[in-house]
């Protein structure tokens, strides 16, 4: 749901399939940004649960600029290997206890081959789970620099197809790992998803291709 309260400024609310309101929906913000870009003919600001983000169109993609989020390295949880069927190399956390857990796989490990943790994840963590790996150019499927999957069954999302809020976290994570300020991500869900990121100062910009279909 989105509505404008003044020219160039609109509000956004999103809900999970369970009916629970989503605190920060990057995918929803991208879609609403594309809608208002068409209505206003230029950039603007979206507000969601108290967070204001700028949006713009660049190089044929829609971009939303989030405040930067820090990731903090942590120990790889002992339950991760059994739950996923692969042993992560590194781990990091972002946000509060209900935030995000990032697990980095070895370069040769295919995220698409992992077992989805399902509801069992909730027994181990209140955090949404982002699994990622760096992609060598010789292994890239579509020119991506990283691959990922996103699981949040405890919030009504067993697996998301494309997750803008997770991309914000991944941009910070890979930047902290010395992998630069720009990433192109292929989300290896069944439907597949493509998102890009760039870090500029205190903001992390998330971009994607959006097709707007207005209701009849």
Image (cartoon, rainbow, N blue to C red):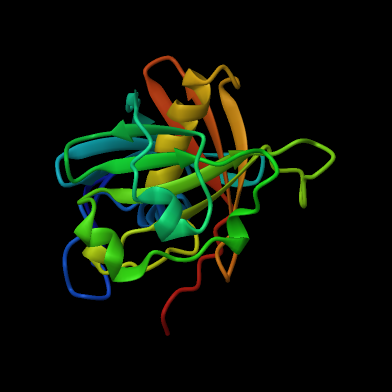
Q: Residue furthest right?
A: 138
Residue 70 at what x, y percent from top left? 33, 24
Work out which quarter of the rendered image holds the C terminus and state it: bottom left
Residue 84 at what x, y percent from top left? 46, 58
Vertically, is 30 above or below 70? below
The structure residue drawn at horizontal position 50% and vertical position 41%, both measured from the top left corner, is: 88
Position of 132 with respect to 103 (left or right) is right
Residue 40 at what x, y percent from top left? 41, 49
Position of 133 with respect to 84 (left or right) is right
Position of 149 with respect to 153 (left or right) is right
Along the viewing direction, whichever of 6 and 130 lies nearer the viewer: 130
Vertically, is 116 above or below 143? below
Q: Is residue 55 visible?
A: no
Residue 62 at what x, y percent from top left? 53, 46
The structure residue drawn at horizontal position 47% and vertical position 19%, both measured from the top left corner, is: 176
The structure residue drawn at horizontal position 43% and vertical position 63%, both measured from the top left corner, is: 160
Q: Is residue 34 visible?
A: yes
Vertically, is 70 above or below 196? above
Along the viewing direction, whichever of 64 and 145 lies nearer the viewer: 145
Tell me which corner region of the image, top left, top right, bottom left or bottom right, holds residue 82: bottom left
Q: Residue furthest bottom?
A: 216
């Amino acid at each position: 749901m989105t509505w404008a309260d003044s020219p160039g400024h609109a509000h956004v609310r999103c809900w999970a399939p369970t009916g629970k309101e989503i605190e920060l929906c990057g995918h929803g913000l991208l879609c609403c940004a594309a809608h208002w870009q068409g209505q206003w003919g230029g950039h603007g600001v979206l507000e969601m649960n108290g967070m204001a983000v700028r949006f713009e169109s660049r190089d044929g993609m829609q971009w939303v600029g989030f405040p930067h989020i820090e990731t903090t390295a942590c120990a790889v949880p002992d339950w991760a290997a059994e739950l996923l069927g692969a042993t992560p190399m590194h781990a990091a956390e972002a946000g509060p206890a209900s935030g995000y857990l990032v697990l980095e796989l070895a370069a040769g490990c295919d995220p698409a081959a992992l077992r989805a943790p399902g509801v069992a994840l909730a027994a181990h963590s209140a955090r949404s789970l982002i699994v990622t790996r760096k992609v060598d150019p010789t292994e890239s499927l579509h020119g991506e620099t990283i691959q990922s999957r996103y699981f949040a069954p405890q919030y009504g999302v067993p697996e998301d197809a494309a997750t803008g809020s997770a991309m914000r976290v991944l941009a910070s994570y890979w930047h902290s790992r010395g992998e630069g300020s720009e990433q192109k991500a292929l989300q290896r869900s069944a439907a597949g998803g493509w998102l890009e990121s760039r870090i500029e100062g205190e903001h992390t910009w998330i971009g994607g291709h959006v097709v707007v279909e207005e209701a009849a």
